[in-house]
Each structure stands twice: as structure tokens, then as C-alpha cells.
Image (tube, helix red, strand yellow):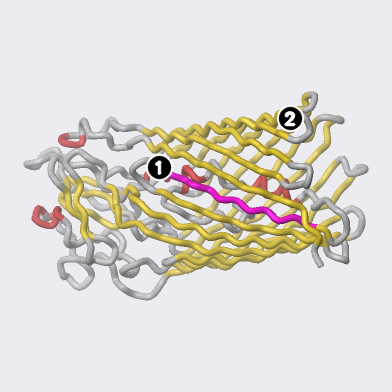
Amino acid sequence: MQLNPFSRRRPKAAAREGVRTGLAAATGLLLTAIPGPSRAGQVEGTTLVYTEPNRVTAVETAIEGSKELKSGGSLLLKFVYDALTGASASGATPADRVQTFTGPSGKNSYSIAPGDTPLDPTFRDERFAGSATWIHPLGRMSQANLGMNISSETDYLSLGISGVITRDLAMRNTTLAAGFSLSHDTVDPTGGIPTALTPLTGSSADENKGDDFQKDDDGDEGGGRSGGPAEAKDIADFLVGLTQVLDRATIARLNYTRGYSSGYLTDPYKILSLVQSPYEAEPGEPLQYLYENRPDRRTKQSLYGEVRRMIGSDVATASYRYYWDSWSIHSSTLDLHLSHRFGNRTEIEPHFRIYHQHQADFYNRYLVSGRTLPTFASADYRIGTFTAATYGVQAVHTLDSGLALRFGIEYYLQQGDSSPPDAFGSLVGPDLFPDVSAWMIRVGTSFPVEWW
């Protein structure tokens, strides 16, 4: 669950998770009232450049502002625009020959050299998003946060609401929190919704289809995109949390989240290769490319713990998150930060994060001809088994005027099993789970303002 309305699905979701605000961090922000005199506020602008060499590049610009209200509460507004271009992994396997694929529209095609990982270079997208959050005190010891958000892409629309109630106890040394997030999303991919586990037509594998070629419900060769109406999915997430002051220098937090998703949860642009069996003429070579299929329901749970301690003028933060879901994915995340001050104006914060994930029960790097097709299958590396590490540092300098300048840089590296033990034929040798690396550069500024 993420109360951050701007964390939406992306082809680079696994990497972007390292720089996105997670549920625990979002809850921490909600537990803190915005400082400042009555009717004061703050404006912040940030630009993020994300690039995977030879793959996806994204540029995101966000502007947010806060304002203290006469009632004692606050209003937060945020607007985001981002543009993505480049190539993303389609899910198909490398081959000993040139592979040709049709794009989602069915009009464009692209070719992949022998031995290379199939990447779809036709990926283009842009997104506009906005949110509003109202923070209102409920007496001296409680606070309510209510939010609404909208996010619109070329092929995706998300509408959501969220809320958190917090209660201070024991002379404000203990804070309890309970929250929810609800969203209704509409998926309208280019070319229409694909028919699950039917072939991508117009590809180079069609010429080798032979007797293994799948037929659609009408008995016609083909399948692929239906061009039918958009599909929808609904997401509901819930949180309970405890924040405790342990001593004058230490704060601890523990959160439990549970989420439910239902509807169209498949990625309409991902495919997987149906390869020749070990007993055929070219074992491991692709016969067809099939559209993936995922279950239409998912339950997610996570436990998050964080300890933050002042060491002199520095602040050290360590957190751990364990996640599991009904797709058999489970993961562990360890996150470490150390904020060091240089005088009263400058702060440097190095950051290290390590993440390990176990694959979904329907993850298949490829399917083998002659075997019964599974009900669900996906070769999307984001739901495979992998380990990822993020290294970064952020610097903040505050001027006498109150203007704060921020600069951050992070490097992300994701690694999986490049040669699974069940590989055979032409699948032995090529990298079936290539490393994914990314650089993330963030620049921003914030300054206090006096609203009317």
C-alpha cells in the first residue's frame, strides 16, 4: 500500500521504488503537523531525472505547496508531470536469429539482433497527476488527514481517495495511526486489451508456428489485441501504525498494512516466448510470442519497522520491511540513512538500500511447446526473483532567506538468475535475466511563503 497518490505502475517500477516515498515514509509525514505561523506555508519544486542506460528515461517535475488554515489545519496541493521514453523489456527470450515484433498499435515493428534481450523501443508515455490533502486537528491530541488524487496517462486513469487518523497518547510520547486508501483505475492500452495467452501476430515467430500455433475462440489463427473496451481495477489498502518515543534521542515506528486488488491486473504490453521443446529441431528457439495473463485478484500484506536516533547533531535511520502477497511474492528491504550537518545551513545524507524478492508462483521466463499452457503466466522480471541495491546521497543547503536548495543522486543495480537450471538448447548461454541499472538525479528547492 502507498498513500502517496503519485506512486503508480510503471515499466521501471522495481527500480523506481528506491526513490518513491513508501507507505511508512508517507505515514511519517502525515504524523507531523506542518510547522509555521498561522496562515504561513511552503512551496517546493522538484525535478527527477531517471535513466536506465539503453533503456527507459523519465523526467518528472513536481510542484507542491502547503498553507496553514485559520481553523488550525493545513491544506496541501501537489501537481506532477512526467514524460517517459526509451525501451522496456517485452518479456520475450533471446534467440539465435533476428527476432521481429509488432508494436502495440499493430503498425510499427522492430527487430532484435541474435542473442540480444528483446526490448520494445516504441515505449512513449506522459502523465499528469494532482492531489489535495486536508489536515485537520480533532481536539488537542488527534488529527485527521483526508486526500484525493487523480493521475492520467495516455492509456491509464486513476482516481483515488485516502485518509489517516492519528491519536497522541502518554504526553505525546505515543502516536497511534489508522489509515486507508481507495482507488479506481481504468486501463485502456494502445491497440485494445489483448486476449490472454494468445499469440502476438505479425512477428517473426509466426513463420515457425507449425502445429503448436494457438487458435482463438472462433477457430481463426491469430488472437492478440481485441480492440475492445477498457478494463478496470480497484485497489483498497489499510494501515495501522504505532510511533513511540523511546528516549530523548530515539523514536521507533511499527506499521502493518493490508491491501486488496481486483480486476484487470495483467500488463497489456508484456509477452512471453513459447519455445521449441528439447526434442524439436531447434530446442529453445521461439515458436510464438504469447500475451501474458495474471490473476484478477491479489492480497498484499507488509510489516514495517523503523528506528530513528540522534547521535550528536547527526540523525541515523534504519528501517526494515517484510512484504508477502497471494501471488507468492515475498520480499525484504533494509534501508539505512545518516543525516550529517555541517554548521547550521548544510546537511548531507548518504543512503543505502538492499532489496530481495522471491518470484510470483506464475512467473515463467518462457513456456515450452507440447506442454499444457498454464492458466496464468508472465515473464515480467519485476515479479521474478532478484536482488537490488541502491546507493545514494542527498545534500540540502538553506540560505538566510529560508530558501532551501536540494540535490540528490542515486545508483540502482538489480540482478537475477541469468542462467536458470532448467534452460536448454539455445537458451543456454544468453543472459535470460540481464542486470538492470539506473541513475536517479533529483534537484529541488523549497521556500516559506506568506499566503493571503
Q: Residue at x 57, y 57 (%)?
A: 6
Asked whether the residues under the numbered discs 1 and 2 touch, taking CB atoms below 8 Å apart as contact, a structural biologist would say no
Numbered label tally: 2
In the shown orientation, is residue 218 left or right of residue 265?
Answer: left
In the shown orientation, is residue 324 left or right of residue 246?
Answer: left
The residue carrying pointer 2 sits among few (fewer than 14), some (14 to 19) or many (20 or more) residues within 10 Å by Cα, namely some
Query: Looking at the image, is mark 1 or mark 2 nearer the viewer?
Result: 2
Q: CA distance from mark 1 to mark 2?
A: 32 Å
- Residue 16 lies, in percent from the top left, at 50, 45
Q: Earlier in the sequence, mark 1 or mark 2?
A: 1
Q: Residue at x 49, y 65 (%)?
A: 233
Mark 2 = which residue? 341
Q: Nearer the viewer, residue 194 or 131?
A: 131
- Residue 76 lies, in percent from the top left, at 72, 60
In the shown orientation, is residue 365 left or right of residue 211?
Answer: right
Three-letter code, disc 2: Arg
Mark 1 = which residue? 52
Q: Which residues are magenta?
A: 41-51
Q: Nearer the viewer, residue 25 or 82?
A: 82
The residue carrying pointer 1 sits among few (fewer than 14), some (14 to 19) or many (20 or more) residues within 10 Å by Cα, namely many
Q: Nearer the viewer, residue 431 or 174?
A: 431
Three-letter code, disc 1: Glu
- Residue 339 lies, in percent from the top left, at 69, 31
Q: Secondary structure at mark 2?
A: strand
Q: Residue at x 78, y 57 (%)?
A: 449
- Residue 185 lies, in percent from the top left, at 51, 66
**Which quadrant of the view contains residue 416?**
top left
**Which quadrant of the view contains residue 423?**
top left
Q: Is residue 431 magenta?
A: no
Q: Secondary structure at mark 1?
A: loop
Observer able to see residue 116? yes
